[in-house]
């Protein structure tokens, strides 16, 4: 199916200002009741209401017409923070957590990130790419069409490059958009002398030589990268022409949030323990705060103060943080539900944060994130007629239809309820 027309849909267009939405604009979904949407090739050709379907299709042209029967049609999700390039599993650590061990205690015992690092170093580039593709397929069935994937389980030049090459290889085999991010500063490898200096002055330049302009990321936390070392990394990234992001304030507010904003970070992610001063600085910046509620659910029930962050005037996005240790879910609908139930966002705010604002984090908002003429035909047809059901439901199935670049890659007929009138 290349060209197709959807009619009688509750369209969530998210059309609006061409910048991250904040304040009252965060909850504006640009709804068109009983609207229609025409896809030509890989682009959206028409969005509107009140025009008979036959007037949108030249006489004699036979293209599929899908009657949504009032159901929601909205942009596909943009998962702007994931770690889905990994090898091995961490089931033993999962049981340790059940028995009372904290995430930091597991990390200090040689588990956590370092256990996955060991598995990734043993894995081939090809095996990593295959695993990425499997996870991407699952995410797509849940409505996600654009995915950011971090390295960070290599922690040396050879294996960080192997991960980034695997991410690139996977991106060539799927319709979904994939954005790779260099996260060589994910942890401190205790077995490598001068690890920080090597990462900054050897690994980062080698990565940039092969992947010019790649986004650089770091995990700033007690037991991981310090504020001083993270700042040095980002200053080097700036010198090399790379944008940067930061994992910050997950367990402790160390002052890196304000420093990252001052340096011009694209996003600051986690924010579970951010101070009022840090949130105020974020609100007065162009930096986007990325909320990761699945981590709180899987780890320790600690969540960012989402309602306070939004009311302060910050631009926010939502992502899954899908990874093997602290956020074992590929589901953006689940992240949306948690953002409403635990962080205090409204369903409309959470949907914007998971689509348009998340696209802004990755710099792809001119291509995806809203249903507008000329943008990629990345859309999903939900099985219900009220988008609030996305947040109301927990751990249910995916959409009836997912289109990526105009290609229907996921289709559920639900007993014939989804009709093709061609």
Image: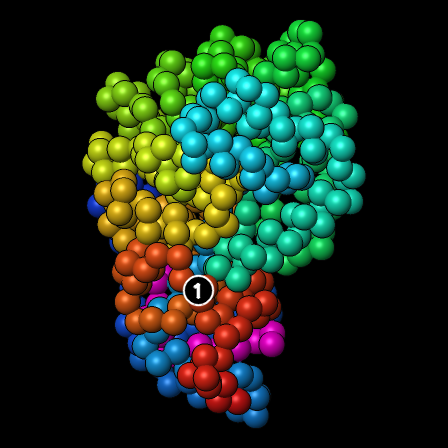
Q: Residue under circle 1?
A: 397
- At which x and y percent is residue 24? 22, 45
Rendered residue at 41%/39% (across/down) = 298
Rendered residue at 33%/51% (across/down) = 337
In the visual, does 190 lie left or right of 130? left
- Spot the residue most to the bottom: 60
Rendered residue at 38%/71% (across/down) = 383
Magenta part of the chain: 1-16
Vertical side of 316 occupied by 261: above or below: above
Q: Which image quadrant is residue 3 in?
A: bottom right
The N terminus appears in which quarter of the rendering?
Answer: bottom right
- Regarding residue 29, the answer to whether it shows in the image is no
- At which x and y percent is residue 78? 48, 49
Vertical side of 410 occupied by 186: above or below: above
Rendered residue at 37%/14% (across/down) = 255
Q: Is residue 10 magenta?
A: yes
Which of these two is toward me, 56 or 280?
A: 280
Q: Is residue 406 magenta?
A: no
């Amino acid at each position: 199916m290349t060209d197709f027309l959807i009619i009688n849909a509750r369209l969530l267009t998210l059309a609006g200002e061409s910048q991250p939405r904040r304040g009252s604009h965060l909850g504006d979904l640009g709804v068109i009741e009983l609207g229609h949407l025409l896809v030509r090739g890989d682009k959206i050709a028409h969005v509107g209401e009140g025009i008979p379907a036959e007037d949108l299709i030249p006489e004699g042209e036979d293209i599929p017409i899908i009657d949504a029967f009032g159901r929601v049609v909205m942009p596909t999700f943009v998962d702007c923070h994931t770690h889905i390039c990994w090898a091995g599993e961490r089931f033993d650590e999962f049981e340790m957590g059940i028995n009372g061990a904290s995430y930091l205690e597991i990390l200090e015992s040689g588990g956590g990130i370092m256990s996955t690092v060991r598995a990734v170093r043993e894995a081939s580039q090809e095996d990593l790419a295959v695993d990425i593709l499997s996870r991407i397929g699952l995410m797509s069935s849940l409505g996600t069409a654009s995915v950011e994937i971090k390295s960070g389980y290599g922690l040396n030049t050879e294996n960080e490059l192997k991960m980034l090459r695997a991410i690139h290889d996977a991106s060539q085999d799927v319709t979904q958009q994939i954005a790779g991010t260099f996260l060589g500063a994910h942890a401190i490898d205790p077995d490598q002398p001068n690890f920080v200096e090597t990462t900054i002055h050897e690994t980062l330049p080698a990565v940039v030589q092969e992947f010019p302009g790649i986004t650089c990321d770091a995990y700033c936390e007690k037991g991981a990268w310090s504020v001083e070392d993270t700042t040095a990394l980002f200053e080097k990234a700036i010198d090399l022409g790379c944008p940067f992001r930061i994992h910050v304030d997950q367990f402790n507010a160390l002052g890196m949030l304000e420093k990252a904003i001052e340096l011009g970070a694209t996003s600051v992610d986690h924010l579970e323990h951010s101070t009022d001063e840090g949130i105020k600085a974020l609100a007065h910046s162009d930096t986007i705060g990325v909320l990761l509620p699945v981590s709180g659910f899987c780890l320790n029930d600690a969540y960012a103060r989402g309602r306070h962050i939004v009311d302060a005037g910050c631009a926010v996005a939502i992502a899954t943080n899908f990874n093997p240790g602290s956020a074992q879910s590929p589901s953006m609908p689940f992240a949306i539900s948690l953002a409403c139930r635990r962080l205090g966002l409204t369903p409309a705010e959470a949907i914007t944060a998971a689509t348009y604002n998340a696209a802004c984090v990755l710099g792809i908002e001119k291509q995806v994130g809203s249903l507008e003429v000329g943008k990629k035909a990345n859309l999903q047809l939900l099985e219900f007629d009220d988008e609030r059901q996305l947040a109301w439901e927990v751990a249910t199935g995916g959409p009836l239809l997912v289109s990526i670049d105009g290609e229907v890659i996921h289709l559920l007929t639900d007993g014939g309820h989804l009709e093709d009138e061609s």
